Image (spheres, helix red, strand yellow):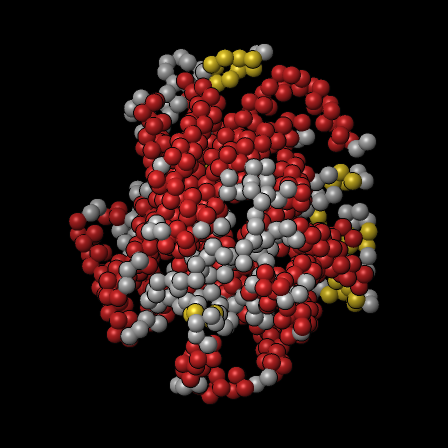
Amino acid sequence: MSDQPNTPAPEQPGVEQTRIGVDSWVAESEDRQARTRGFFGPAARGWDASPDSVKLFLFIAVAGTLPFWMNAGDLFIYGLFTVLYATLGLGLNVVVGFAGLLDLGYVAYFGIGAYGYALVSSDHYGIHWPTLAALPALTAFTGLVGLLLGFTSRRLVGDYFAIVTLFFLQAFLVFTNTANPDIAGVGLTGGSSGIGNLDPLKFFGYALTSVKQQYYFFLAVLVLATAGLYFANRSRTGRAWRALREDPLAAEVMSIPVNRLKRLAIVMGAALAGLCGGIFAAIQTAVTSSNFTLNVLIFIFAVVILGGLGSIAGPILGAIVINVSFQFLQPQNDHPDIKRWLFYGAIVLFVALMKPWYRAVVVLGGTLAFGFAVHAIVSATAATSWTGGAVTDTGHASVGKAIADWVVIPNQTLHGGFDTYAYIGLVVLVCVVRSTSGWWRSLILIPTLYMTAVVWETVLAPSPAVTAEILFGVLLIVIMTARPQGLIGTARVEIV
Amino acid sequence: MHPLLFSIIDNIRSLGWGGAFQLLRNGLVLGSLYALIALGYTMIYGILKLLNFAHGDVYMVGAFLGYGILTRLNGPLNLAIGIVPAIALMFAVAMAGSGVLGVAIERFAYRPLRNAPRIAPLITAIGVSFFLENSVQLLTNGYQYTYNPFELGKTGTEELGPLYHTVFSVAGNPVTTVQLFVVGAALLLMAALVLLVSRTKFGKSMRATAFDREAASMMGIDTDRVIAITFFIASMLAGAAGVMFGLYLGVTYYFMGFLAGLKAFTAAVIGGIGSIPGAMLGGLIIGLVESFAIGYVGGQWSDIVIFGLFILFMLFRPRGLLGSRAIQKV
C-alpha cells in the first residue's frame, strides 16, 4: 500500500469523500444535528435511541404481516425473494463487508447448496434425506468448499482472490451446465435442464408447501442469521475482522491471525449461501444453472453495496429496495405505468435533492421547457416519422399522450440506428455533467435529463430486463464513487 | 483408469500429427489474441495495482466498432473500398474508439477512487464491466453479429475471400492469410509497445509511475496523464484484438468479453503480472493450452483445465513465470 500517496484527492463538489485528518465525531456532528431537526426529527431521534433488538422486532412485526394482505404470487416475488436476497446479502457482507475480501464466487456456493439439496432430496438418484439432515449437511459441505477455496486466499491478496473466485464461479457454471459428467449412469447435474421434482422442506412429517409457510420459515432463517451475525460482529472476532479489513498488514503486526480470520469469514459466508441454496431449491422444486449466473452475483452485490458494506441492517434494506424495484421492472410483473412513475419519480427526486432549492426549480422547469421546445422544433422541421414512435405500455392514455408530446420518440423501424446514437449520446452527456460544476453543471443537466427521458422511452422501457441489469452496473459505480458507505453505513473518516 | 483418460489417449491417437499441427496453429492464433488483451491487464495492473474487470468488455466493444465500420462500408461482399484500406479503417476506428472508452472509464470510474480502500475500485470495475456488457446487449438485442470474414473482399467465382486463401500447408493442413495476419499484427503491436515502454521518454515516465506513483509525481511527472495514456494504449490493444477476433472467428456478441477477459487475466498472472514479456508468454501458453484441451479433452472441459492451471500457479508460483517477487513495503 506504500505506493498510494497520502495526498487528499482534489475536492469535488457534491462528492462525499473520505475526510482525512478529521476526528469522526467532529466530522459527523453536523449530520447528527441535522438528523434530529425538522419534521421527521422526533422519529429519527426515537429510532436512534431504541436498542437494536427493538429495531429487529419492529422489522419482524412488519415483515410478519405481509402474508395477511398479499396474495400468494405477490408474496412470492416481493416477500420471499426479498428475504432470500437479504439472507444472501448478509452472508456476502461477512466476506466483503466485515473481512474486506472480494468474493466473486459467492453465487457458486449458493448453487452448490441448491444442487446439493437436489442430489440428496429428489428422484434424480432416488435419495430422499430428511430435511433436518439435508440442510445442515449442505451448510457444512458448502462451508468446506469455501474453506478449500479459502486456502488459496493465503497467498492471494485482494484482486487475486477476486479473480480466483470469479473463475471458480465460471468453472461451476460450466461444470453444471455443459460438463455434466455421468455418474452411476445419470448426468450428475442434469445439464442445462437441471434437476426437477425436488422434495419440499419437511419437518417432523409437516411439509412446507404453501408460499406462506415457506415465507415464514425463510423469515425465521433471516432473523436467526441477522442475530447471529450481529453478535459475531460485536465479538472479538468481529473487531478483528474490521482491523483486518482496514489494514491487513497492521492487523498482522498486532498478532491478529489474519489468514485464519479470512478463512473463517469465507467459510461463514459460504455456509450461509449454501443454506440459502438448499432452501431456495426446495421452494423452487427445481434447480438449473441459470439460477446462479453472474447476474445473480451482481444483484447480491448491489443489495449489499446499496445498503452499506459492513452494516447488519444494510443488506436487509438493500434487498427490500432493490428486489421490489427489480420486480417492478420485470416484464411479467408489469403494472400499468408503474415503471414510468418510478423512473420520473427518481429523476424528480434526484433534482429536488440539489442545493440550493432554486437551482432544482430552474433545472426542472428548464428540462420541461427544453423538452417542449425540442419537440416543437423536430415536429416542425423533420418528417413525421421522427416523432411518430409509439409510447410503450401506458396505463392511462392521457399520460402516454402527454409523454409523446414532450419526448421525441422516432419510429423504430424507420430510424433503426437512433437508439444506439441516443444511448451513446446520453452516456457522453452524463460524463460531461460529471466533469463540470456549478451553474455549468446545472445548465448541461437540462439536456441530459431530457436525453435520459428520450432514451428511457425509446430504448430502456421496451426491454426492462436488460435495463435492470444496466441499472445495477450504474448503481455499483455511482455508489462506490459518490457514497461508498451506502444508504445506512457510516462514512469512513481516516485519522492521520 | 478413468474413462476420460482413455478418451484423451484415443483423441491423441486419432488426431495424429496433422491434428496436432492444427491444434498448435489454432493455439498460436488464439494465444496472440489473449496476449494482446493480457498486455492491457498487465499494464493497468502495473501502473494502478487495479484489476480492470472492464478490460474484457473494452475488447468486446472494439469488436463491435469493427463490425459497425464493416456494415457502414456495405458489408463484406461488396465493400465500398478495397479490402486493405477497409481493414485498416476497421482497425483505426476500433482502436481509437476503444482507447477513448478506456480513458473515459479511468476518468469517471477509477480516478475518483484513487485513494480509496482497495476494494472500492474493484467493485466499481465490476460495475463498469456489467454496465458495458448490458448496454451492448440492449443495443444489439443480444444477437450475435457475424463479420462473414470468409466473404470479405471476395470477387467473382472465388469460393473464399482473400483472408481465407491458403498461404502454405503443412502435411495437408492449410495456414490461411488471416491466421498469419493475426499472429503478425499481434507481434507488430507488441514490438511497438515494448519499444514505447523501453525506449521513449513516455515509457520511462510510465515505468516510474508504476514503480512509485508518489515519487514519480514529485519528480514532475503528471501521473494522472500517464495513467490516462496507459489506459488509452491498453484499451487500444484490446480493441485491435477485438477486430482480429472478428476477422478470424467471424462472430461478435455482447458476452464475448467476459470469458476472454478472464482467460487473458489468467495469462497475465501466469506470465507474471506487471511484466510485459510475461503477458505475451502467458497469452501464448493459455491459447495453446485451450486449443489442445479442446482437441484432446473436449470443448466443455477447456475452461476447467485453464482454471485448474490458474489455481496451480496461484498455489505454487503466484508471481508467475517472469514476474518479480513482490515485496510488501510498509
Query: Would you say A12 lies left or right of B11 here?
Result: left
Question: In the rendered view, does A211 fall on the left or right side of B83?
Answer: right
Measuring from the top left, give residue B15's x and y in whole percent.
Answer: 66, 19
For the point 76% across and 38% down, the residue is A182
Residue at the image point whose x is 23% and y is 48% from the top: A384
Q: Is residue B265 left or right of residue B136?
A: right
* Quarter location, residue A216: bottom right
Quadrant showing the C terminus of chain B:
bottom right
Q: Is residue A128 left or right of residue B47?
A: right
The spot of residue A477 in percent (x, y) is: 44, 58
Residue A272 appears in the rendering: no
Q: How many marks?
A: 0
Nearer-the-camera pick, A153 or B163: A153
User: Which residue is located at x 33 percent, y 33 percent?
Assistant: B92
**Could you say where residue B81 lies in the image, as x and y percent from the top left?**
29, 24
**Which image quadrant for residue A253?**
bottom right
Residue at 75 percent across and 32 percent down: it is: B4
The one nearer the camera, A480 or A213, is A480
Seen in the picture, residue B307 relative to A285 is either above or below; the reply is above
Residue A325: % across, % down: 49, 64
In this rendering, is residue B163 above or below A338?
above
Q: Is residue A352 above or below residue A190?
A: below
Q: Is A209 in front, or is B177?
A: B177
Query: Visible in this render: residue A203?
Result: yes
